[in-house]
Image: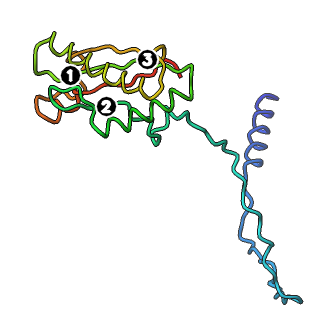
Amino acid sequence: MTFKFLATLFIAATLAACSSTKLDTPVVDAPVIPVTPSAPVTPPAELPPAQSTVKSVVLHPLDDPQSVLAKRSVFFEYDSYEIAPEGRALIETHSKYLNSHASASVRLEGHADERGGREYNLALGQKRADAVRQAMKLLGVTERQMESVSFGKEKPVGLGHDEDSWAKNRRVDVNYQTR
């Protein structure tokens, strides 16, 4: 019997604890008090401009796409190893860099388009690379800073079979080995 009595008492206590309070009492807002300023309101003083915490990055001239040194190909006419005026300007720029950086070295890689035989294009690519090498030598670049090789038609950048692609492949690439 005590068990029934305790169980009933427990249930009654639980139900009493779960009863909710009625919320029918109105919420009273605080009274609004008008404020009249005694002095004119001045805006806050201007803050100094924010200082950037981002560190500026200085690119090496050979890596900067805006630099003239980013251009690394000298282009040639069909079946020719004569350097065009545009190519001379590029060669002069790279020669100045090499002259001012004695430890820098380049590999001059001659290329040809797909027309012509393998041996002929290897020879033509070598003549183009040697022409650029000779021009750089005349501009003061030392022999130890340069190496000339030919890839003939083996490494095309233009993959089509038209004049635009062939023009892209008739070139000497200035490939820096050391800076």
- Which three-letter amino acid code belongs to the residue tagged 1? Ala
- Which three-letter amino acid code belongs to the residue tagged 3? Met
Identify the image quadrant of the N terminus.
Answer: top right
Residue placed most toward the observer, 50 or 38: 50
Label of residue 74 in the image:
2
- Do the residues under discs 1 and 2 have CB atoms within 8 angstroms? no
Query: Whole-percent x and y of residue 151?
Result: 26, 14
Query: Whole-percent x and y of residue 22?
Result: 72, 64
1 or 3: tag closer to the N-terminus: 1
Label of residue 146 in the image:
3
1 or 2: tag closer to the N-terminus: 2
Could you tell me which secondary element the residue under label 1 belongs to? loop
Query: Whole-percent x and y of residue 144?
Result: 48, 13
C-alpha distance separating marks 1 and 2? 12 Å
- Which three-letter amino acid code belongs to the residue tagged 2? Val
| Category of crowding for the residue at label 2, using alpha-carbon neighbours closer than 10 angstroms: few (below 14), some (14–19), many (at least 20) | many
Q: Residue at x 18, y 27 (%)?
A: 80
| Image label count | 3
Could you tell me which secondary element the residue under label 3 belongs to? strand
Image-quadrant location for residue 14: top right
Query: Whole-percent x and y of residue 172?
Result: 30, 25
Vertical order, 33 against 139 (above or below): below
Q: Residue at x 50, y 26 (%)?
A: 98
Residue highlighted by disc 1: 112
Residue placed most toward the observer, 159 or 48: 159
2 or 3: tag closer to the N-terminus: 2
Could you tell me which secondary element the residue under label 2 belongs to? strand
Q: Residue at x 75, y 73 (%)?
A: 27
Q: Residue at x 17, y 24 (%)?
A: 113
